[in-house]
Image (cartoon, rainbow, N blue to C red):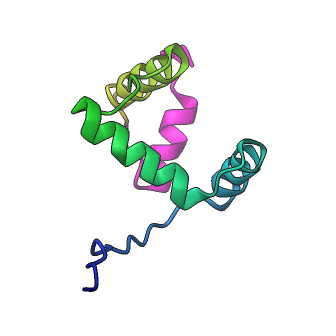
Amino acid sequence: MQMKKDPKKKLNINIDKNLAEETQSVLDELGLNQTTAIIMYFKQIVAKGKIPFPIELTDKQRASRELRENIKKIPVEKLNTQKQIEDWFNDESQDY
């Protein structure tokens, strides 16, 4: 009697080339390949019922996000004509 193999599902992902190469370098040191590492990761998700590590922004990422949000709030004056541009440059009342 022949035993059935577990069906496999092929995953195709696109990942940054440098990240993949850096990851492979670490995995080589650990004696693992990328497939094994991904399987280990998936098994931990199933076993723990969640991502097996905290996912949160770093302080630098939080600060960058806050800066981007604040930049969006800065009013922008659109200068569409040569006259508007000249007037803007010649406006002595502005402190820029």
Residue situated furthest front in the rendering: 1
**Which x, y percent locates residue 27?**
69, 47
Answer with the quarter of the image where residue 16 lies: bottom right
Question: What residue is at 42 percent from the left and 29 percent from the top?
Answer: 68
Residue situated furthest left in the rendering: 49
Locate residue 21 relative to residue 95 in the image: left or right: right
**Which x, y percent locates residue 91?**
51, 26
Locate residue 51 relative to residue 58 in the image: left or right: left
| Residue in the foreground of this view, choosing between 58 and 73 | 58
- Can you say which quadrant of the picture contains the C terminus? top right
The residue stretch that appears in magenta: 77-96
User: Per the image, is 40 magenta?
Assistant: no
Q: How many marks?
A: 0
**Which x, y percent locates residue 20?**
64, 56
- Seen in the picture, residue 76 relative to 21 is either above or below; the reply is above
Answer with the quarter of the image where residue 49 lies: top left
User: Per the image, is 87 magenta?
Assistant: yes
Residue situated furthest bottom in the rendering: 1
- Can you say which quadrant of the picture contains the N terminus? bottom left
Question: What residue is at 72 percent from the left and 56 percent from the top?
Answer: 21
Locate residue 60 relative to residue 24 in the image: left or right: left
- Seen in the picture, residue 17 relative to 44 is either above or below; the reply is below
- Seen in the picture, residue 17 relative to 56 is either above or below; the reply is below
| Residue in the foreground of this view, choosing between 26 and 54 | 26
Question: What residue is at 45 percent from the left and 46 percent from the top?
Answer: 40
Question: What residue is at 36 percent from the left and 37 percent from the top?
Answer: 44
**Which x, y percent locates residue 4?**
26, 79
